[in-house]
């Protein structure tokens, strides 16, 4: 079941996915965390315009457009509180807003920067996408499925062979995937892995 803010999260991940496509897999997975934080920084005004335009395109009344904007502001405040993003200028609430429903920001042009943890999760998601595409390609060409990525060692080897990463880069990315993807994503990998690379 999707949460009340999942639709708003989709806006962020649409922007993040576009950035991943633009910079490419190797850059996405081998650049330093600070460089990636800079690349994935979004200006609030950018997401505001995106939400407003998409809601108006659906001919939603002004009140619904305003509510959609309020929800994205609530998501930004929640993610700031949870340490997923950093908001330039921080997030405040008025004294009368005891439930924190109406976040106040320093301006309409503040930057929204992912934390290191969020960058790692974006990298892990890029690896997930690689694994799915790789295994799908193997399933179509190799009926025995013997070449599928089944564990972290297979993943590291596939990253070197098919993505051109050296052993240090591939090991680092495999470790990021192991540590920052969801437990469900890595369960089959973890139970079959010798962790002493």
Image (cartoon, rainbow, N blue to C red):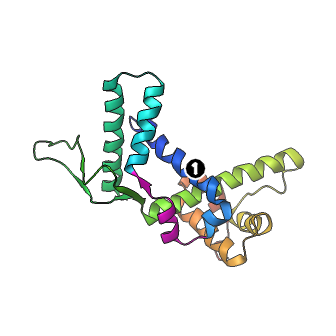
What residue is drawn where x is 10% and y is 47%?
Answer: 95
Q: Secondary structure at mark 1?
A: helix
Answer above or below: position of 100 versus 175.
above
Using the image as rendered, state which of residue 39 and residue 175 is in the foreground. Answer: 39
Expressed as whole percent of the image width and height from the top left, the position of residue 141 reads 89, 48
Quadrant of res 81: bottom left
Expressed as whole percent of the image width and height from the top left, the position of residue 107 reads 27, 52
Expressed as whole percent of the image width and height from the top left, the position of residue 157 reads 76, 68
Q: Is residue 160 left or right of residue 182?
A: right
The extreme left residue here reads: 96
Quadrant of res 186: bottom right
Q: Are there few (<14), some (14-19), or many (20+) residues within 10 Å of tag 1?
A: some
Quadrant of res 29: bottom right
What residue is drawn where x is 58% and y is 59%?
Answer: 124
Q: Which residues are magenta?
A: 31-43
Regarding residue 192, the answer to whether it shows in the image is no
Question: Where is the C terminus found, in terms of image quarters?
Answer: bottom right
What residue is drawn where x is 58% and y is 49%?
Answer: 18
What residue is drawn where x is 57% and y is 60%?
Answer: 123
Expressed as whole percent of the image width and height from the top left, the position of residue 150 reads 73, 57
Answer above or below: position of 172 versus 190.
below
Q: Which residue is mark 1?
A: 17
Answer above or below: position of 26 versus 131.
below
Task: Reply yes or no: does residue 164 show up in magenta.
Answer: no
Q: Looking at the image, how many numbered discs can be counted on the residues?
A: 1
Q: Is residue 166 left or right of residue 29?
A: right
Using the image as rendered, state which of residue 60 and residue 191 is in the foreground. Answer: 60
Regarding residue 55, the answer to whether it shows in the image is yes
């Amino acid at each position: 079941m999707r949460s009340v803010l999942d639709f708003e999260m989709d806006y962020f991940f649409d922007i993040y996915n576009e950035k991943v496509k633009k910079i490419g897999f190797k850059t996405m997975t081998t650049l330093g965390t600070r460089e990636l934080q800079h690349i994935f920084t979004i200006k609030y005004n950018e997401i505001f315009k995106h939400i407003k335009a998409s809601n108006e395109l659906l001919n939603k009344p002004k009140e619904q457009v305003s509510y959609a904007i309020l929800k994205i502001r609530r998501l930004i405040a929640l993610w700031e509180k949870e340490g997923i993003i950093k908001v330039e200028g921080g997030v405040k609430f008025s004294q009368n807003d005891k439930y924190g429903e109406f976040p106040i920001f320093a301006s309409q042009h503040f930057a929204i920067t992912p934390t290191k943890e969020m960058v790692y999760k974006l990298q892990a998601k890029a690896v997930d996408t690689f694994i799915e595409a790789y295994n799908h390609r193997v399933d179509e060409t190799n009926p025995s499925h013997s070449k599928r990525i089944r564990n972290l060692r297979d993943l590291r080897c596939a990253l070197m062979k098919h993505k051109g990463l050296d052993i240090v880069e591939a090991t680092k990315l495999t470790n990021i995937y192991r540590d920052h993807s969801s437990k469900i994503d890595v369960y089959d990998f973890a139970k079959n892995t010798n962790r002493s690379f």
